[in-house]
Image (spheres, rainbow, N blue to C red):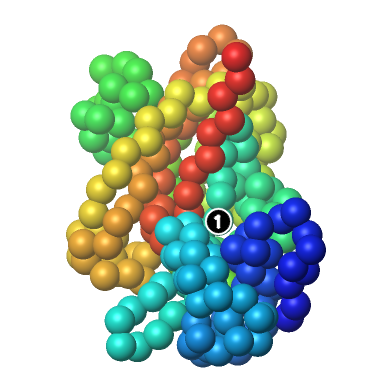
């Protein structure tokens, strides 16, 4: 690792960039502590304050974890996702070079809750019947990341025995001709209870991102009511606002 003392790029920024490259090494990804600040400073021929500034930046970003008396180590960076990619979680992750693992998938016909009946605007007769519910736990790098619950309007024609390994809205279109056109989203923060902690392989009380959405067709008819619970240490949401 070398810095260019003649470069217009600030030394702390150069050190930060070098540290990011260093953290790609398997040993640091597997939990090995970083060398002490003084050793890094000596190797790069910069001040210890410069190294500390670069490390502090990575700690603030959540890339590094620093504990007094123990040292500094890499923290798995959360994936960045955006609302514009709502139709396909797996496709979005594939674009990032991440292969999604399905840990479990369960379907069944169940009486809708009041919340589900309101979200899907079910008729009185439909509310008294049964509605298809699907639960999935998915993740990457062998770690669960999102627990999803979907309720489908009867107009989709979906059945519990359908092949849900297919892209979901392609399956909906094939079964009913309905086209997923819009998604009404709500995002909030919560803490994992024991059930969520068990599903997401985290600890009770860990931070969770909760995403509720209602998917509709071009005629504004409801297709799906979807609840997603994300491990906050595995995901972050990014929004781009344009004037």
Task: Look at mark 1 in the image and give the residue it sits on.
Answer: 79
Q: Is residue 233 visible?
A: yes
* Relative vertical location of residue 215 with respect to residue 72 in this rendering, above or below: above
Residue at 21% x, 29% y: name it.
114
Residue at 56% x, 45% y: name it.
81
Q: Quadrant of the N terminus?
A: bottom right
Q: Position of residue 39 (x, y in %)?
A: 55, 89
In the image, 135 versus 232, the foreground residue is: 232
Quick check: 112 left or right of 92? left
Residue at 65% x, 64% y: name it.
11
Label 1, residues with CA under 10 Å away: few <14, some 14-19, many ≥20: some
* Relative vertical location of residue 114 with respect to residue 143 in this rendering, above or below: above
Quadrant of residue 154 within the rendered picture: top left
In the image, 2 versus 106, the foreground residue is: 2
Residue at 77% x, 68% y: name it.
4
Q: Position of residue 165 (x, y in %)?
A: 63, 55
Classify mark 1: helix, strand or loop: strand
């Amino acid at each position: 690792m070398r810095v260019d003392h003649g470069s217009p790029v600030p030394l702390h920024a150069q050190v930060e960039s070098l540290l990011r490259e260093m953290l790609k090494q398997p040993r640091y990804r597997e939990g090995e502590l970083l060398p002490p600040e003084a050793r890094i400073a000596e190797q790069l021929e910069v001040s210890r304050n410069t190294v500390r500034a670069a490390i502090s930046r990575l700690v603030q970003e959540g890339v590094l974890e620093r504990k007094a008396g123990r040292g500094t180590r890499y923290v798995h960076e959360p994936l960045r996702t955006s609302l514009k990619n709502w139709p396909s979680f797996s496709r979005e992750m594939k674009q990032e070079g991440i292969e999604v693992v399905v840990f479990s998938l369960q379907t069944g016909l169940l009486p809708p809750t009041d919340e589900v009946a309101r979200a899907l605007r079910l008729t009185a007769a439909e509310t008294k019947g049964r509605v298809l519910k699907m639960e999935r736990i998915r993740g990457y790098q062998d770690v669960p990341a999102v627990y999803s619950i979907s309720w489908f309007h009867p107009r989709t024609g979906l059945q519990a025995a359908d092949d849900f390994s297919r892209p979901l809205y392609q399956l909906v279109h094939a079964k009913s001709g309905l086209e997923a056109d819009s998604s009404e989203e709500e995002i909030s923060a919560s803490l994992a209870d024991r059930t969520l902690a068990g599903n997401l392989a985290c600890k009770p009380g860990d931070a969770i991102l909760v995403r509720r959405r209602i998917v509709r067709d071009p005629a504004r008819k409801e297709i799906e009511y979807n609840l997603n619970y994300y491990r906050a240490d595995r995901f972050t949401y990014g929004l781009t606002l344009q004037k």
